[in-house]
Image: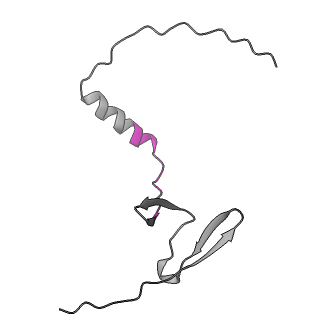
Amino acid sequence: MAKIDIEPARAKLFTHGGSQAVRLPKAFRFEGTEVAVRREGEAVVLEPIVRRARRTQADLDAMWARIDAMGVDFPEREQPPMQERDFDW
């Protein structure tokens, strides 16, 4: 089977304030207002940031119920005394 050479898409670089920016072609646009950025060797990888829904009280109650169901007792320990602080404002 013959290898087909397809020219990779190109993006323009420019400076905005003190940062370098990339103008992405339409085919590479992201939803939202932010992306995660990381390096892999010489490559710079952009990934969408997926926002998770806020936890509800029911979610937190279920989490604590799962922890309680594990049957693990946390050791009791004495807390050190509160430190006195002197603020000169």
Query: In which quadrant of the rendered image does the N terminus lie?
Result: bottom left
> Which residue: 48% across, 49% down?
54
Q: Is residue 52 magenta?
A: yes
Residue at the left extreme of this rendering: 1
> Which residue: 44% across, 60% down?
39
Q: Is residue 89 magenta?
A: no
Residue at the right extreme of this rendering: 89
Q: How many marks?
A: 0
Question: Vertically, is 61 above or below 18?
Answer: above
Residue 31 falls left or right of residue 63:
right
Write the start and end of the magenta stretch as one range.
Answer: 45-60
Q: Quadrant of residue 85?
A: top right
> Which residue: 47% across, 10% down?
79
- Between residue 56 and residue 2, name the one nearer to us: 2
Residue 77 falls left or right of residue 71:
right
Residue 37 falls left or right of residue 16:
left
- Between residue 42 and residue 60, name the one nearer to us: 42
Tell me the colour scheme of the image: one colour
> Which residue: 46% across, 53% down?
53
Question: Vertically, is 67 above or below 17?
Answer: above
Q: Where residue 89 sits in the image (x, y, percent)?
A: 82, 19
Q: Where residue 2 sits in the image (x, y, percent)?
A: 21, 93
Q: Where residue 42 sits in the image (x, y, percent)?
A: 43, 65
Question: Vertically, is 88 above or below 63?
Answer: above
Q: Quadrant of residue 19?
A: bottom right
Q: Where residue 26 sits in the image (x, y, percent)?
A: 52, 82
- Between residue 70 and residue 9, name the one nearer to us: 9
Residue at the front extreme of this rendering: 42
